[in-house]
Image (cartoon, rainbow, N blue to C red):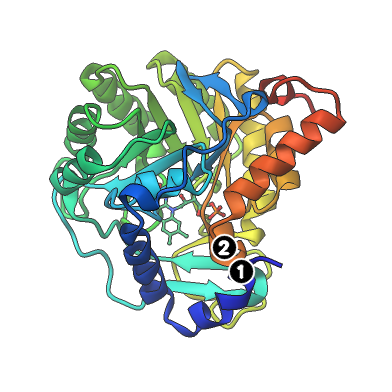
Amino acid sequence: MSIYSLIRPLVFRLDAERAHRATVNLLKLRTGTAFPPEPPDTPELASRVAGLRFPNPVGLAAGFDKDAEVPAQMLSLGFGFVEVGTVTPRPQHGNPKPRLFRLVEDRAVINRMGFNNHGHLAALEWLRQSRHLGGIIGANVGANKESADRIADYVAGVRRMSSAADYITVNISSPNTPGLRGLQDEGALDELLAAVAEARADAPIFLKVAPDLGEADPERIVRAAIDHKIDALIVSNTTISRPPLRSSYANESGGLSGAPLKTLALDALRRFRRASGGEIPLIGVGGIASADDAWERIRAGASLVQLYTAMVYEGPGVARRIAKGLTARLAREGLANIADLVGTE
Ligand SMILES: Cc1cc2nc3c(=O)[nH]c(=O)nc-3n(C[C@H](O)[C@H](O)[C@H](O)COP(=O)(O)O)c2cc1C
């Protein structure tokens, strides 16, 4: 039994957004000598994706550390990489509260945060202060709700954040900024990716997509991504669909994440793998909570995985547990490196 399972009832007595804020504040106290040493580097879990060396394939998904306050602390918990953001050019409050709901019976979360963040400059400042522990820090960028030129917001994100992050994620899949997902549509996507390609510096660019896609979308998105030299696709963001749920919060509007997203995100990943035939690396995210979930996602074509909601239910040790589980299973199945597993289903 983990320590977290003992304190979880206390955490869950707090409103979800307060619990999140308290957690980030606690993590901020873990600085300097309080850090455990670098995450143990298990060579069999290390791999190269998009030219970067990832010490293990389990990443923290965007949205937990929106302002890049605690990336080093999250790396020290055993994540192989941490994606901060979404950050927008200008600070914004996001949607009115309440906007974050725990669906405990479903091991899920619904959020309609709406890109609350302190803006690019604040995130840059935090990133410069954070201690780098040998993992990878990515910056996820978006557009301000009231922006007159959303493409310009992404271009600004790529330009500014490339100096402080190992990779940049272009997030066009959050359901909580009206019209944002429209950037995944044919003409808009092409225009956006052309502008991003022109603005890019050395940092690789990842594109994060929604799980709610039409029949022909994966092929079209893969083609546009390859044409514009995007380095990887992150599949996927939260869903606006509602699979059967038990919680009384089931009908709150926003994006659903956690266990009920798992099948949908896995299915979307398989479709992107089929459409790409391995030509562009994929990062699997959505409902991953165990080493078996990560294993399944990697076999389905993910070079890396990310999680967020599982941390709410399983606690901060979840990344380390998954990494350990993957190492054990590699040994059991006689594989030398996690990269040998990618797309083998
Ligand atoms: C509270 C919350 C806030 C999120 N904020 C962002 C965000 O700002 N940008 C983004 O790209 N994804 C965001 N996400 C989506 C996650 O990065 C991830 O794609 C999704 O939750 C599915 O993974 P999970 O089931 O492991 O949580 C957020 C998710 C949650 C639960």
Residue displayed at 24% across by 31% down: 164
Classify 192 as above or below 31. above
Mark 1 vs ligand 1: CB under 8 Å?
no
Q: Which residue is mark 2?
A: 315
Give the structural element (helix, strand or loop) at label 1: helix
Residue 26 in view of the camera: yes
Query: Residue 64, which numbered label?
Result: none
Residue displayed at 61% across by 79% down: 247
User: Mark 2 and 1 residues: CB-CB less than 8 Å, in contact?
Assistant: yes
What is the three-letter code of the residue carrying label 1? Ile
Tell me where residue 161 sits by quadrant: top left
Question: Residue 159: x percent and y percent?
Answer: 19, 27
Question: Residue 69: x percent and y percent?
Answer: 28, 52
Q: Which residue is mark 1?
A: 3
- Report whether 178 appears left or right of 284: left
In the rendered image, the quadrant that contains the C terminus is: top right
Residue farthest toward the front in the current orientation of the protein: 33
